[in-house]
């Protein structure tokens, strides 16, 4: 089990009735919504407003790839902690690992690749430098050193 120190950020959410299926369990696709909200709030905490980003640079972020393992169910009124970690920042994409926790119980783990594209054409483009720099500042130095060593 990973500790909180292995993650760059966390965000808390409460499970509402609308999040559950007929069995009273969080509907599987809603974990992707929870992960999206956590990434959006994380960007906001870095001073990156996605509407402003589009207006100023013409670039948007889109989900390119997801893979989620569902390990334990969440239910109505549970408080869930979404933990997010950047695994890789490329020129036009960012790979995240995100996990949903209820207390000490891991509920779901996802790998999400986000792509940076031009809003009009949806063609890949470079992540704006100020956004990339802000993201990189959130990666703990020990992990940055490990990632540099692994790349060489």
Image (spheres, rainbow, N blue to C red):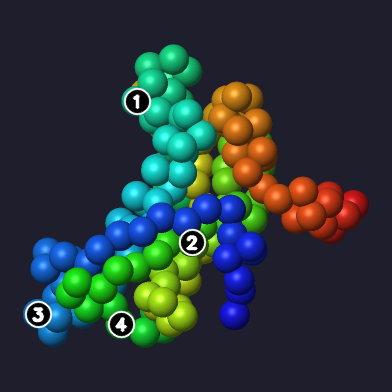
Q: Position of residue 94 (x, y in %)?
A: 57, 46
| Residue shown at the point (36%, 59%) measured from the top left | 12
Q: Quadrant of residue 52?
A: top left
Q: Mark 2 highlights which residue?
A: 83
Q: Quadrant of residue 1?
A: bottom right
| Mark 3 or mark 2, whichever is nearer to me | 2
Work out whether residue 54 can be spotted: no
Whether residues under marks 4 and 3 lie with C-beta atoms below 8 angstroms apart, the answer is: no
Of labels 4 and 2, earlier in sequence is 4
| Residue shown at the point (46%, 29%) measured from the top left | 48
Q: Mark 1 highlights which residue?
A: 51
Q: Nearer the viewer, residue 98 or 105?
A: 105
Give me the C-alpha separation between circle 1 and circle 3.
Answer: 35 Å
What secondary structure is found at the residue carrying circle 4?
loop
Looking at the image, residue 41 sits to the left or right of residue 140; the answer is left
| Residue shown at the point (46%, 44%) measured from the top left | 42
Q: Is residue 44 above or below residue 108?
A: above
Work out whether residue 6 can be spotted: yes
Give me the C-alpha separation between circle 3 and circle 2.
Answer: 27 Å
| Mark 1 or mark 2, whichever is nearer to me | 2
Q: Mark 3 highlights which residue?
A: 22
Q: Quadrant of residue 31?
A: bottom left
Q: Is residue 12 above or below residue 72?
A: above
Looking at the image, residue 144 sits to the left or right of residue 13; the answer is right
Of labels 3 and 2, earlier in sequence is 3
Of labels 4 and 3, earlier in sequence is 3
Q: Mark 4 highlights which residue?
A: 73
What secondary structure is found at the residue carrying circle 3?
loop
């Amino acid at each position: 089990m990973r500790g909180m120190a292995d993650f760059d950020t966390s965000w808390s959410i409460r499970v509402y009735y609308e999040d559950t299926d007929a069995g009273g369990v969080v509907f599987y696709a809603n974990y992707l919504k929870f992960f999206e909200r956590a990434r959006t709030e994380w960007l906001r905490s870095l001073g990156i407003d996605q509407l402003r980003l589009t207006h100023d640079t013409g670039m948007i972020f889109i989900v390119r790839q997801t893979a989620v393992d569902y390990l334990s169910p969440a239910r109505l009124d549970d408080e869930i902690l979404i933990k997010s970690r950047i695994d890789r920042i490329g020129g036009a994409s960012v790979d995240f690992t995100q996990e949903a926790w209820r207390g000490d119980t891991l509920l779901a783990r996802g790998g999400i690749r986000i792509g940076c594209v031009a809003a009009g054409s949806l063609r890949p483009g470079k992540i704006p430098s100020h956004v990339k720099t802000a993201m990189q500042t959130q990666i703990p130095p020990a992990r940055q050193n490990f990632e540099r060593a692994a790349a060489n």
